Image: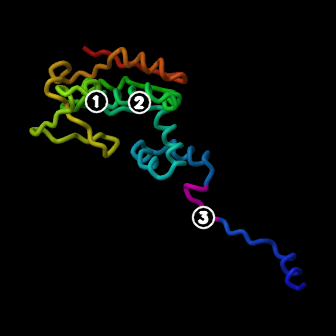
Amino acid sequence: MSGSRLSGRFERLIIEEPASLTNIPIELIHAIARFMPRRDLLNLMCASKQMYAVTISLLYMRPEFTSTYRYAQFVTTITHNQRLAELVRELNLSHFAKLPMVGLAGWREWKYRSESLYSIYPNVDSPESAQDDQSTVKHPVAHPLLLKYSPGVHDVPLGSLLHIVKACPHLRYFIFPSRTN
């Protein structure tokens, strides 16, 4: 009897977990992640399923590209994955003219990646690959047979722009690359 009287007077002691990325509100994580550099978002994406959901939406909302090769990968991804295409809100391609692309693979290498003659060519005279500015992922080098078609030019095929417009229903802001002569 005395045991039941004591338990009636004491409230259950609730021990709270310390705050971590897995138990704080998703809105708070999103608010913090919006101000993180892209490199950190890419790392955060690997932390958990919850972090993946937050970071993937931020990365696809305003994608940035370090080369026309990465741009071509993006176009292929969104045309094959409608869920990711629906995340895209803004796209700015005007910075392609400023990118240092000398010796790096461009969209042509991506387009012809499955062709045996034009697949990514390991060039022994130049570094195996160059580092992207914003990640530790290696960038493929330009193929010697494709260099003559666009040496130093950062062109973007018109068809890829049309694929983006068709695939991304929520796209509201699009800056096209300007042609510089």
Mark 2 → mark 3, Cα distance in angstroms: 38 Å
Please state, as top left, top right, bottom left or bottom right, where the C terminus lies in the image: top left
Q: Is residue 45 left or right of residue 21?
A: left
Dot 2 or dot 3: first in sequence order is 3
Query: Percent from the top left, x then y, of residue 69?
Result: 30, 29
Residue type, numbered disc 3: Pro
Tell me the SS state at disc 2. helix
Q: Residues within 10 Å of mark 2 (few under 14, many from 20)?
A: few
Identified at 14% across, 24% down, the residue is 145
Q: Is residue 131 left or right of residue 38?
A: left
Please state, as top left, top right, bottom left or bottom right, where the N terminus lies in the image: bottom right
- Residue 63, above or below 157: below
Residue type, numbered disc 1: Leu
Residue 77: which disc?
2
Mark 1 → mark 2, Cα distance in angstroms: 22 Å
Q: 99 or 55: which is nearer to us? A: 55
- Give the residues in magenta: 17-23
- The residue that disc 3 covers is 18
Dot 1 or dot 3: first in sequence order is 3
